Image: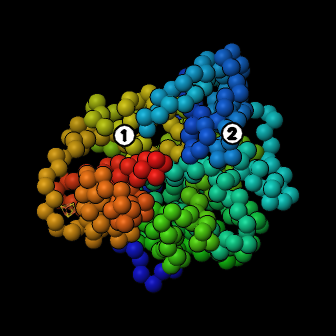
Amino acid sequence: MAAKFLQSIPVPHHKNTQGFFPVRLTDVKSVTIPMSMHIGAPAKPVVKPGDHVKIGQLIGEPGGFVSAPVHASISGTVKKVEPMLLSNGGSCMAVTIESDGLNEFDENLKPPVLTDMDSFIQAVRDSGAVGLGGAGFPTSVKLKVDPDKVDYILINGAECEPYITSDSHTMIDNPDRMYAGLGALKRFYPKAHIIIGIENNKKKAIEVMRKYTDDVDNCDVVELPSSYPQGGEKVLIYNTTGRMVPEGKLPFDVGCIVLNATTLSFLGKYLLTGRPLTTKCVTIDGSAVKEPKNVIAYIGTSVRDVVELAGGLKCEPGKVLYGGPMMGLAMPDMDQPVLKNTNALLFFDEKDAKVPEPSACIHCGRCVDACPLKLMPTELEQACLARDVDRLKKLKINLCMECGSCAFVCPAKRNLVESHKLAKIIVREADTK
Ligand code: SF4
Ligand code: SF4
């Protein structure tokens, strides 16, 4: 554990759905499943309109090494295989399946047989696992490293974003799956010290994880402060191991692998059942929602259907977010589907959706004090406006994890994160030239 935690800020927790068992949404007429729900090459569709599919059947094969397969989340008939627009402005192929109402699983699914490291990595790849906390990086790629060089495996159960409780529910409701996942990690990375990091406002999750890991060697449950952004990858690594990931490097470069708690739970479930990733626990909350709750939704269910099945909206939302209010992505319409890495859908009324007008910087320095990585957000903004690539590099723009802490504390409501995202693009384009 680090002698001192990195800088963090108090944010309102709004964990309204803590303590309520998730509701399973089964009455879905159709799903539209994008082939790109991960970082890397999109999957390639392997079905065509008219095909009948069952839950867990492969519908998209990996499009490269950094990629992941995609599976049918409901049983029924493939209606369309065509491009769709995504919330991030990109597009990819998507498979639309109309339900036959039977919710039948593919009868060929069976637990994988793990004989060695290669079979483990292949099983992780076949499962369709990607970073389920939001990042969407293919898990098999993350785990395909020399086990002798892995000092720590960090299980990220911090869940520091306001509103979201789906990870803590996964830990509380399915500890047996976490346990199965931990067993595989112990088997294939025997030297690694496993640390499960959980914010100290999630007492029940801490209690359950401690109970279930009591007999697991070299495995600790670490309580983190309940302040943002404890779940940021670099922050979690430093706060639990004292190691800092340098600019341009990966966690593995400092001997660490970081897995989200829900990713580990899903891996455990896959190893026990052979059923690939087809559902997701999602927190439904925000000022426009009638009844905040956690739901288990089929991947590909439209956001509109999810919120209707979950109790509906009080009013027309002014903004809908994939993920939390600090790092979440606004979606253009409610036809967008639940993705593998969707951990929350937040619906805000017009009042809460209003973005304040930025005013001139008053050089108060609060943004600098708030940054966990000791960057200078206001200087970065100036360098971005001036398109000064050398200065952006000197200010280490690529260390910025876009956590939004600087913007949250800024009294002038400067659009700091947007400018940091733009600055990264400016630097990348300059380097490409
Ligand atoms: S968004 Fe970037 S600059 Fe702002 S606090 Fe987070 S890491 Fe620091
Ligand atoms: S917090 Fe806002 S007003 Fe204060 S220095 Fe940073 S950008 Fe300027």
Q: Residue at x 28, y 30 (%)?
A: 316
Disc nearest the viewer among 2 and 1: 2
Q: Is residue 142 above or below residue 209?
A: above
Res. 19 mark? none
x 17%, y 50%: residue: 358
- Residue 203 rendering spot, x and y as whole percentages: 47, 68
Give the distance between the C-alpha atoms of the residues marked 2 and 1, in whole angstroms: 27 Å
User: In front: 241, or 362?
Assistant: 362
Report helix, strand or loop for mark 2: loop
Query: Do the numbered discs 2 and 1 sit on residues whose CB atoms are within 8 Å?
Result: no
Q: Which three-letter amino acid code belongs to the residue tagged 2?
A: Pro
Locate residue 385 relative to residue 296 in the image: left or right.
Answer: left
Please name the residue that numbered disc 1 is placed on: 330
Q: Is residue 219 above or below residue 279?
A: below
Residue 219 x, y percent position in the rendering: 64, 74
Residue count near mark 2 (Cα–Cα under 10 Å), binned few <14, some 14–19, many ≥20: many
Q: Residue at x 69, y 72 (%)?
A: 149
Q: Is residue 204 visible?
A: no
- In-image side of 308 versus 195 (left or right): left
For label 1, the SS is strand
Q: How far from the left and from the top, in percent, is residue 100?
A: 65, 20
Is residue 365 visible from the viewing direction of this image?
Answer: yes
Depth check, front residue: 295 or 5: 5
Residue tagged 2: 62
